Image: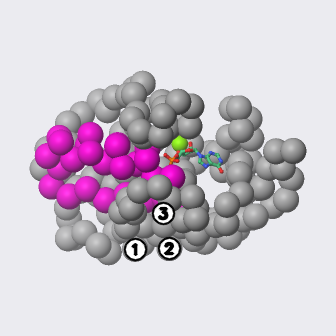
Amino acid sequence: MKVLLDGATIQTRVRALALEIERDYPPGEEIHLVCVLKGGFMFMADLVRAMSTRISLDFLAVSSYAKSTTSSGEVRMLKDLDSGLQGRHIVIVEDIVDTGLTLTYLQEILRARSPKTLRTACLLSKPSRRQVDVTVEYIGFTIEDHFVVGYGLDYAEQYRNLPYIAVLDLQ
Ligand code: IMP
Ligand code: MG
């Protein structure tokens, strides 16, 4: 496995993203961060530790049909949020945007719950793989079309614990 982004590089970028997000909201207004499990858990943990404004957080889990059968991007909610989104500033926190299908669908679901604002933060983006033009306001790193693991991202549930991001050779 080849290290693509080491731990220090990720930490520096995540801290910068946290400050950028904070600056984009009116002072004193709470930001509600919604983490997409499981891949987003480590990014979420580091992001919120670098924020000093008023935040709250919640978690959801989806199963994607995008890769298996059709490329409809339809997702099934495996674990829904604990609280409603109405009138709140929502930031979706996701590990990676690849085809964009999962996020597009998720944004639709959450937008229907009438948040005051809805934005998305992804640690990684693979623009060369995009199938739909999804809006992601905060992107940590833009990467080439490699399959990556670590820092929350898995291959068959392995490698999520790595404190860095590596390219997995799938041969
Ligand atoms: P999309 O609908 O194609 O954008 O799918 C995004 C989801 O696919 C992410 O949330 C990841 O769970 C998974 N995924 C995409 N690329 C990778 C990768 O390189 N490593 C690990 N998971 C990935
Ligand atoms: Mg994911």
- Whole-angstrom CA distance, mark 1 to mark 3, is 11 Å
67 in magenta: no
Quadrant position of the C terminus in the picture? top right
Q: Residue at x 42, y 67 (%)?
A: 138
The answer to whether the residues at label 1 and label 2 have Cβ atoms under 8 Å apart is: yes
Q: According to the image, label 3 marks what residue? A: 50
Would residue 170 be seen by someone viewing this image from the given angle? yes
What is the residue that sits farthest to the front in this orientation?
70
Horizontal side, residue 90 vs residue 38: left or right: left
Marks 3 and 2: in contact by CB < 8 Å? no
- N-terminal-most mark, 1 or 3: 1
Secondary structure under tag 1 reads helix
Q: Amino acid at mark 2?
A: Ala
Q: What residue range appears in magenta? A: 99-125
Q: Label 2: which residue?
A: 16
Q: Mark 1 vs ligand 1: CB under 8 Å?
A: no
Q: Which residue carries the number 1 mark?
A: 20
